[in-house]
Amino acid sequence: MAKGASLSGFPEWLPEERVVEQQAIDTLRRIFELNGFLGIETRAVEQGSSLLKKGETSKEIYLLSRLQEVGQEHDTPVEDRLGLHFDLTVPLSRYVVENAGALTFPFKRWQIQKVWRGERPQEGRFREFVQADIDVVGNAELPEHYEVELPLVMVNAMESLRAFGLPKATVHANNRKLSEGFYRGIGLTDIEGVLREIDKLDKIGADEVTKLLVETCGATAKQAEACLRLAELSASTGAELESRFNALSKQCGIDKTSEAFALAQQGLSTLAMIVDESAKIRPGSVIADLKIARGLDYYTGSVYETFLDGAASLGSICSGGRYDNLASQGNRKYPGVGLSIGLSRLVSYMLHGAHAQASRISPASVLVAVWNEESRGESNRIARELRSRGISTDVAPKAAKLGKQIRYADHLGIPYVWFPASDDAEESVKNIVTGEQLAAQAVSWTPDSVYAQQTVRVDSDKR
Amino acid sequence: MAKGASLSGFPEWLPEERVVEQQAIDTLRRIFELNGFLGIETRAVEQGSSLLKKGETSKEIYLLSRLQEVGQEHDTPVEDRLGLHFDLTVPLSRYVVENAGALTFPFKRWQIQKVWRGERPQEGRFREFVQADIDVVGNAELPEHYEVELPLVMVNAMESLRAFGLPKATVHANNRKLSEGFYRGIGLTDIEGVLREIDKLDKIGADEVTKLLVETCGATAKQAEACLRLAELSASTGAELESRFNALSKQCGIDKTSEAFALAQQGLSTLAMIVDESAKIRPGSVIADLKIARGLDYYTGSVYETFLDGAASLGSICSGGRYDNLASQGNRKYPGVGLSIGLSRLVSYMLHGAHAQASRISPASVLVAVWNEESRGESNRIARELRSRGISTDVAPKAAKLGKQIRYADHLGIPYVWFPASDDAEESVKNIVTGEQLAAQAVSWTPDSVYAQQTVRVDSDKR
């Protein structure tokens, strides 16, 4: 992060760090578009009433007021004020409802934008950060196969970010129907409450969660134990998942003819499909992990969290799920499924955990030297010629001593310095990394391919 | 603009419109990087004290408050609150000061980001919009040649946007030193006041401006007339500019040995250089136009505005200038020169004035049909094969009747529908635009080049 960054929670990158973020964004966009997702951008602001709809995050909203209104903000109820969006799902829901007539459904969209949360900044938690989302939203209905395909697009995306130093990512999937069916099957009714407490498992441990289940969700000690045993269940094949779940259901005395059991089986079959289909393409990329609960209460089917090998402290770096009731207009519902990458946190890890680096600070391959200010026009002409051929080129800021001009190139990592013809010498170009100097003409010269583009590399010496 | 857009002044584009904006952004970025500018992104928020420093726009700031603070906003003075940036120049100044030790000067940066202004929305005026900026900032000093080169980079950028339907752009340049020298030379002292009134010429006309100069700037009728005659002066060569300006100075009785005249000559020579150098590269791309004043008072040298042929109602679409005193720390100054494109307004023009259109709504070249849900895996396998070869591919949402699957492709503008092998037929691909259908294999097939990429075209029939 830029050292001088003066506002906690609002990360800013130095130019060479921004190259890493920008190229990570370019990479994600390429993968999303390769998979046929349409890019959109929504406004940064939403009505307070939209922002307040969603549970947990509602306390973290930034509200806006115009400078002229200072002192009168109170005259307007929060619901009618504008606030900055805290995710890209709430704006998507609104966008889909507003533009339903102009969209083709199922609507597959990618969106990479900043979001804002007014929470207390802590390590790796930002108040302003970039999210990279994909969602598919249906009109009235949405086939289940998207619950299988979307996490796989994200597996693909995170695989492509390994070039930036990201470790292997594993998606942990669960299904709300499975959980709800199980909880109801053992006689619990406060499903949201149970999910909320189970979501705390990693943070506060099994003993505390048991206590909370009993105290706040009306569970008996035995019911609480069953919930914890369900949360311990994981599997990397559909068959394994089914046999373990069915064994546990039997042990807990769930009636196989009950509605609850049928609901659980519905979730189970989707989850088994996700694990098996993903294993065909990339074994181990998606596992069933029945402790994944997701705090937000709008998920209705599959839920996903994603963890990086050896970087568990980052928490889930890509989360989401299926939501059937987030967007609706009148009786018309727009069910969706989507995942969101917390990109700023990943970029922070790439830069400081994996030491990803831009190959150079400047996009320029070439710095054209300037012999004297009178001949700057000639240096500019050479630069224009190179640029017209797609070669990014800068021109020395001042006709200073040659050593100083070369140092400017060196500071910016520009690999080539171009010397216009002079009384003493013909036109030439020098690679200041290798020291090689050759006669060259702007109309035909091309840089060595390793020096042609600004790239990102992971400096393994520093790891 | 998306028809349902529910908040006035906050434009949102439909997916096919967003393609135009996204590709315009990509084009600008490419030009900026080709010219050796470094990309940065700054946080969306600044301290109130930074935002309030700058004159004119200070009434248009959006301030933030956290939801928990509602009702207590007042306890914090506006200077200590956070607000959304209203341009990218104020954030750049702060960024440069904060990171001066880590940057190489002169610091050439591009930045394309949203900005927010709480003003009353009106035609073509947005409360949230995208700006595309380039600036060069020096440490203590900044060579004048950047005042020539930066408008030319923007000429180049706007030239490249003509593919999106933009008419020819002309940069109108002036120089504050020239204006100030002239005004002082004829005996005026309230230079900022005169610039402010002259800036209104196009809006309120010569008579009103004359009145204001007399009433608010202490000008005599004769001085006001001289100001207006200066504002009428324009030229497309340096020699023309010099002879006209010097003739006018003489008529107005300006003393050639005065400090004021020397200051004017300094501005004159820079402006002449801008016009002559740009004429060498692109005749007519930059003209001297002495009525350009720019309302904001931080400019100290060259000032620029840019107008589109036949679209004067858009106002200036690319403006800026040289500022010597915007960024400083202690005695250290960071003089800069930069220009800013108001991109959202241009995109609005491209879409609705020039009828620029995405060649298709979806980035996908191919839709793979699905014969039945059991064989979806085979369709997915074909899609993965095509994607691995860089061909953007979607898969039919449902194993519906073939006509319905083709209609889905047609709605999204996807040119090819791929048919996996079936009992009846071998694997083939159909171009649904031309009707041509050929046997094909995913490992080797490539789309015709005209259908390979999503592009933007200008539909001249609709103009």
Image (cartoon, coloured by chain):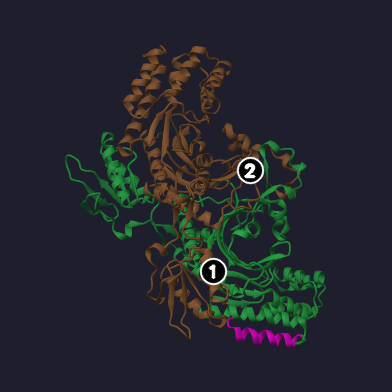
Chain colours: A green, B brown
Magenta stretch, main secondary structure, is: helix
Q: Looking at the image, is B122 positioned above or below residue B373?
A: above
- The residue sitting at the front extreme is B461
Give the number of the disc on residue B155.
none
Give coordinates of residue B242: x percent, y percent. Answer: 34, 23
The image quadrant that residue A65 belongs to is top right
In the rendered structure, does residue A241 fall within the stretch colored magenta? Answer: yes
Q: Which residue carries the number 2 mark? A: B82
Q: Which residue carries the number 1 mark? A: B407
Q: Is residue B59 visible?
A: yes
Q: Looking at the image, is A176 positioned above or below residue A382?
A: below
Q: Secondary structure at mark 2?
A: strand
Alpha carbons under labels 2 and 1: distance apart: 50 Å
In the rendered structure, does residue B414 fall within the stretch colored magenta? Answer: no
User: Which residue: 38% across, 51% down?
Assistant: A363
Q: Looking at the image, is B384 positioned above or below residue A74?
A: below
Q: Which amino acid, by three-letter code, is at mark 2?
A: Leu
Q: Nearer the viewer, residue B390 or B77?
A: B390
Mark found first going from the N terminus, 2 or 1? 2
Q: Chain of mark 1?
A: B
The magenta segment is A233-252
- The residue sitting at the left extreme is A424
Q: Secondary structure at mark 1?
A: helix
Taking the image as shown, residue A330 lies to the left or right of residue A28, namely: right
Q: Quadrant of the C terminus of chain A?
A: bottom left
